Image (tube, rainbow, N blue to C red):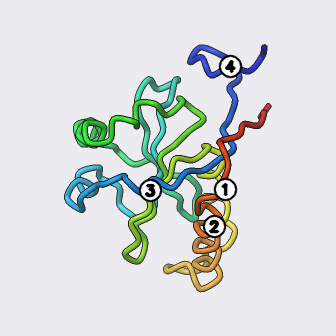
């Protein structure tokens, strides 16, 4: 009873399954309108802030990007399922690195796992081969797996 997906609940169930969104579409100019300075980002609805927040992983940790809410609303108009993301525990994770166009519905802890990988492995200005290898391996693990979404409890 402590865990609920109701927005006012103190604790929430965090989904376990990641989903590759093969039907998700966003044009390059729409991406640019979101004002995210790099090609990796995650977006989630914060119940505390009462709006969608955008973050990108960096060697310094998760860095908030000033999200254009008008651009976000346009994206939602083209992808209405975005309104179904459970606040605080589910995110849209975007990978546009090196020409990739991958979009995932993920548990929020996956986003912070990526942030941790980058913090742990990044070297110099460009990250170095170890960091990029860790990033590529992270996204390879997110590829679709069979079975229905499962849930696990987080305290």
Q: Which of the labelled discs sits on residue 99, or is there none?
A: none
Q: Which one is nearer the viewer's eye here, 97 or 60?
A: 97
Give the distance between the C-alpha atoms of the residues marked 4 and 3, in whole angstroms: 26 Å
Which part of the image, by quadrant, shows the N terminus? top right
Q: Where does label 2 land, which residue?
A: 138
Residue 7 is left or right of residue 64, and the answer is: right
Q: What element carries label 3?
A: strand
N-terminal-most mark, 2 or 3: 3
Position of 24 relative to 78 (above/below): below
Q: Are there few (<14), some (14-19), or many (20+) residues within 10 Å of tag 3?
A: many
Question: Disc 1 designates what residue?
Answer: 113
Q: Which mark is residue 103?
A: 3
> Which one is nearer the viewer's eye here, 136 or 147?
147
| Foreground label between 2 and 1 | 2
- Percent across and percent down for residue 4 are 68, 19
Mark-to-mark CA distance, 2 and 1? 9 Å
Task: Report whether 98 appears left or right of 117.
Answer: left
Q: What element carries label 2?
A: helix
Looking at the image, tell me whether mark 4 or mark 3 is earlier in sequence order. 4
Residue bearing mark 4: 4
Q: How crowded is mark 1: few (under 14 residues within 10 Å), some or many (20 or more)?
A: few
Name the N-terminal-most of marks 2 and 1: 1
Nearest to N terminus: mark 1 or mark 3: 3
Where residue 45 sits in the image (x, y, percent)? 47, 32
Quadrant of the image containing the C terminus: top right
The residue lying at 58 percent from left, 74 percent from top is: 136
């Amino acid at each position: 009873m402590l865990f609920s997906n109701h927005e006012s609940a103190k604790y929430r169930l965090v989904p376990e399954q990641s989903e590759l969104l093969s039907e998700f579409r966003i044009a390059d100019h729409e991406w640019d309108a979101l004002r995210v300075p790099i090609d990796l980002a995650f977006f989630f609805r914060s119940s505390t802030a009462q709006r969608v927040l955008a973050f990108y992983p960096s060697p310094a940790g998760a860095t908030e990007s000033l999200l254009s809410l008008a651009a976000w609303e346009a994206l939602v108009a083209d992808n209405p399922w975005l309104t179904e993301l459970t606040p605080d525990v589910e995110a849209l994770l975007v990978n546009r690195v090196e020409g990739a166009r991958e979009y995932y519905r993920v548990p929020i802890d996956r986003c912070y796992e990526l942030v941790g990988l980058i913090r742990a492995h990044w070297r110099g200005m460009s990250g170095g081969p170890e960091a990029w290898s860790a990033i590529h391996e992270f996204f390879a693990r997110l590829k679709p797996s069979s079975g229905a979404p499962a849930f696990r409890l987080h305290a």
